[in-house]
Amino acid sequence: MQMSHGEITVDELLLADELTGADAAATASADVAEYALWLGDDALILAQQLGGWIARAPELEEDVALGNIALDLLGHARSLLHYAGSGMPARAGAGAGSGMPAHAGAGAGSGMPARAGAGAGAGTTDGRSEDDLAFWRDEPEFRCAWIVEQPNGDFAQTIARQLVAATYMFELYSALRGSADATLAAVAAKSVKEVDYHRDHAIQWTLRLAGGTDESRRRMLRAIGDVWPYVDELFRDDPLIDRLEGIAVRPSTLRAGFDAVIDTVFAEAEIEVPRGFVSSGGGRHGIHSPNLGFILAEMQVLARRHPGATW
């Protein structure tokens, strides 16, 4: 489909074009949908966070780089949340006067707003599109890990968070390419190429800041210490994974690959792996840090202020 803007044309990328080898109309089981939420929410919240650096990064090139990384992650989130929505029941409990318009094609009282600009059949099987899941869930319904909720802070803080998140995601998507679920495997095959760049970007900046001035090194060391309590949550196994044998990736199996990369980077940067406090986490079960509420308030305000708006 071509949308014309004067002499400029913008291609509207169909989800099917992003999922080579998979059926974009596939329906996830309840457990697979929950797992897709884990991954999709990590990508969505991290993308929202990185967007905060646009026009604020320390140099113009980083404005572009962080913006592109955010767009990559938003694409991952779109695919994963679309798939998650296909296996989720319609949201209940929003009756008349709730302020939430009914979703096109959903039953009365479903509580889901119409997808902006979408025509018939554009949503998922039961009507919960990726937009619905991004803009109309509250904090306890999100499944992101605490690491992606941590504040941007200064540039070193963002790079430390990116180093952890991108290294983890690279290991995750590398393994998920072998999933028995064709849709998850297709998302992983596309995403791993992009997070490989994200990881390299974070590694290069970690080395640059740790090996730069006394001030840049001090900030990098502080940032590593600040984000490290949130690393362990990424690698905790869960009963959900037991039920998805051959489909989901067992988080604990990713730790060795993650540690190997981090150990190499830290050795070159002369950084010691922090020891001590480990966060309890709980994001996979809807228990979040106080930061998530502020992130969602900013991300969701337009959709909730003007439900059903199109532009």
Image (spheres, grey):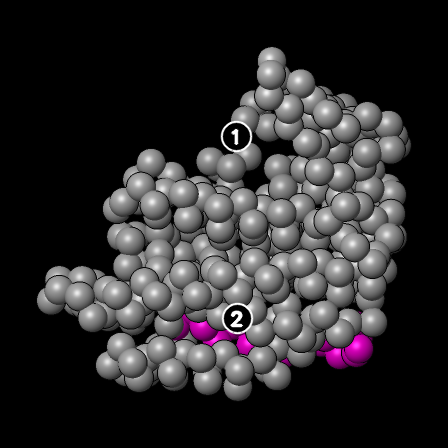
* Residue found at x 38% / y 68%: 203
* Residue found at x 62% / y 47%: 75
- Disc 2 marks a residue whose amino acid type is Tyr
* Residue 212 in which image quadrant: bottom left
Viewer-closest of 78 and 300: 78
* Quarter of the picture holding the N terminus: top right
Magenta part of the chain: 229-247
For the residues labelled 2 and 1, say whether their Cβ atoms are less than 8 Å apart.
Answer: no
* Quarter of the picture holding the C terminus: top right
Residue at the disc numbered 2: 168
* Residue found at x 61% / y 77%: 251
* Residue found at x 37% / y 52%: 151
Q: Is residue 243 above or below residue 74?
A: below
Q: Is residue 50 above or below residue 217?
A: above
- Label of residue 301 in the image: 1
Q: Residues within 10 Å of mark 2 (few under 14, many from 20)?
A: many
Q: Is residue 158 magenta?
A: no
Can residue 132 be seen here? The reply is no
**Cα distance, mark 2 to mark 1?**
30 Å
- Disc 1 marks a residue whose amino acid type is Val
Q: Is residue 48 above or below residue 84?
A: above
Residue found farthest to the top: 6
Q: Horizontal and vertical percent for residue 207?
A: 29, 70
Viewer-closest of 79 and 60: 60
